[in-house]
Image (cartoon, helix red, strand yellow):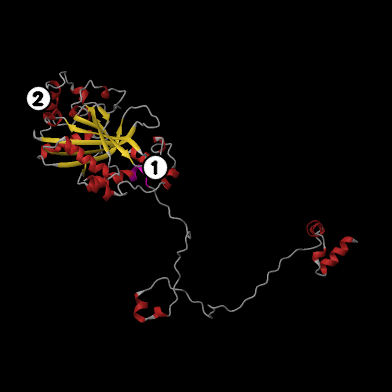
Amino acid sequence: DIAKGFLAAVNAGDVASVPPKELDALVKKRKLVKQETWKTFTISKGASFALERKKAASDLTKEMLQDGSWRDAEFKSYNLVPGAGAPPNGGCVHPLLKVRQQFREIFLQMGFAEMPTNNFVESGFWNFDTLIQPQMHPARDAHDTFFMKTPAAANRAPEDYVKRVRAMHETGGGGSIGHQYSWKRSEADKNILRTHTTAVSARCLHKLAQDGFRPAKFFSIDRVFRNEAVDRTHLAEFHQVEGVICDVGLTLGDLIGVLYQFFARLGMTQLRFKPAFNPYTEPSMEIFAYHPMLKKWVEVGNSGMFRPEMLQPMGLPEDVNVIAWGLSLERPTMIMYGIDNIRDLFGSKMQMSSVKNNPICRLGMIEQRETVTMTE
């Protein structure tokens, strides 16, 4: 029959003449044929053939150098193949931290000392009253400031300094009439999340006055908190960059000169200044710069000279002036990395891939020497 003919063909070694379908039936269904696979190897002597197994050395030891055995020794080859081995696990630096470090390097290059900014919780006294900001100011309302519930109040400021600040608020001094209202200690003792790092500057200036005045330059970069509506350009917390210089006889011209030097290191040499109002600086200026990446003028910060009403209660000499400026950290970071929504930069909506794959921060590196020289 037909099956017998197929079996005879298989037995004769002519498997190719059997249709695949019939061969599959003979193997799997009828179990008349058993399929086997034979592998054949041919062995010959190679270039590294040896009668004894020799282990390659992995290190060049001092014994090899001493007895000269390194000349005939066989060493393991280096594994330098790209992509070979498991990739090492490591952390990635957030874009904000990259830009923050570059800002810090710029301040240090200009001779500034960093202020301690570890107090996220401040009393209303250090955050507002020391800056001679009246207690009825709208910025001190719950609509703009986060107030602590526990503990709700605390103030470790020296009592003599508190009395001088209170007198400056109520009656003034040094040619100022003050704010002419009844200053309340309970309002000053309220604990809040600091709304600006100028509270840190006030602490450092007071300490400088108590330790004996000397010319100084300070800077700080850290978080501040404000009760604002969250949108694509605003969050309830952000980072503030602040620079402070105190010396005898400083003027507005000194402030403008320092701002030109500072922003030149950021790659912005064209600046404009607009008069502004700040409760604790007079005169005050908004800073505008022509941004080379955006190809347009943008507001980059605020600046001014601290009012004498703020400096006098601290105990600083009358001929000492303090100039200061501040800007946010998020705005230049968003411009540099092309981020349109601040929630894509900071917060729970930020993608981990953007942290791992963002490029290095070139802030302060691009033509820094040329821009500073041109400004000077």
Q: Which mark is residue 337?
A: 1
At numbered mark 1, what does the secondary structure look like: helix, strand or loop?
helix
In the image, residue 136 lies at what x, y percent? 23, 20
In the image, residue 337 lies at what x, y percent? 39, 42
Residue 11: tell me if it is visible.
yes
Q: How many marks?
A: 2
Three-letter amino acid code of the residue under disc 2: Gly
Query: Label 1: how many residues lie within 10 Å, few (<14), some (14-19) or many (20+)?
Result: some
Q: Residue 66 is drawn in which quadrant?
A: bottom left
Principal secondary structure, stretch drawn in magenta:
helix
Q: Residue 20 is drawn in which quadrant?
A: bottom right
In the image, residue 147 lies at what x, y percent? 29, 26
Residue 95 covered by magenta stretch: yes
Residue 157 covered by magenta stretch: no
Q: Which residue is mark 2?
A: 175
Of residues 31 and 304, which is closer to you in this image? 304
Which region of the structure is painted magenta?
Answer: 93-98
Q: Left or right: where does residue 370 sit relative to residue 315?
A: right
Residue 182, relative to residue 331: is it above or below? Answer: above
Residue 25, relative to residue 207: is it above or below? Answer: below
Residue 61, relative to residue 203: is it above or below? Answer: below
Q: CA distance from mark 1 to mark 2?
A: 49 Å
At numbered mark 2, what does the secondary structure look like: helix, strand or loop?
loop
Query: Label 2: how many residues lie within 10 Å, few (<14), some (14-19) or many (20+)?
Result: few
| Dot 1 and dot 2 residues touching (CB under 8 Å) | no
Of residues 283 and 344, which is closer to you in this image? 283
Three-letter amino acid code of the residue under disc 1: Tyr
In the image, residue 138 lies at what x, y percent? 26, 22
Sequence-first disc among 1 and 2:
2
